[in-house]
Amino acid sequence: MIDPNEFLAVQSKMMASLNNMNTDILIIASIMIIAIMPFIYDDIKYLDVLSLGREQAINLGVDYDRLVKKMIIVISVLVSISTALIGPMTFLGLIVANIARESMKTYKHTYLILGATLVSMITLIGGQFFVQHIFKFNTTLSVIINFIGGIYFIQLLLKESK
């Protein structure tokens, strides 16, 4: 059995929040993100080909295995940076990627990455606005995102099952 006050303290440390951002590592995180950008800049043009599938990408001259491994490493590093800064947000990636793809109606990753960045900024800023002004800090941003993301995930599952 745990005291409700202790549970709230544990929950606030475990849930992602922009209010509890680890500002001590903000400069290190910024440097790491800036260092990663030139590493992947030339490979962004190949993401459209990768989305065609392994065989088609290899037939079109892309070193599929090398590029996929490189992108997995880059994605892992970027996710670890964001998780270290504000904590885990389970459904944020699902929401952002699907809304960007549905709203932009394109498969070009140069546009999708920019669109997903914009959608994620709007989601985080809008969610933080709700936390501060509507919920008066009675909940965390990750609870709101997980709630909306869970509903969106169920809606996607129901849409795909039809």
Image: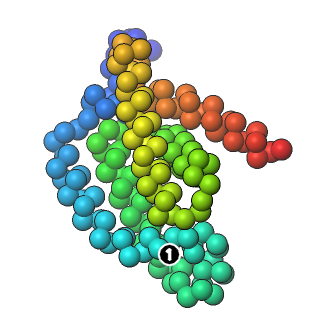
- Identified at 20% across, 46% down, the residue is 26
Q: Is residue 1 above or below residue 15?
A: above
- Identified at 24% across, 65% down, the residue is 35
Task: Mark yes or no: residue 93 visible.
Answer: yes
Q: Quadrant for the C terminus, please.
A: top right
Q: Is residue 112 above or below residue 47?
A: above
Which residue is at the front of the view, 21 or 12? 21
Q: Quadrant for the N terminus, please.
A: top left
On the image, the x and y values in percent for residue 150 come to 60, 33
Q: Is residue 53 above or below residue 136?
A: below
On the image, the x and y values in percent for residue 137 come to 35, 16
- Identified at 51% across, 70% down, the residue is 47
On the image, the x and y values in percent for residue 112 come to 51, 57
Is 73 placed left or right of 64 in the picture?
left
Give the residue at mark 1. 46
Is 120 placed left or right of 58 in the picture?
left
- Callout 1: SS: helix
Name the colouring of the figure: rainbow
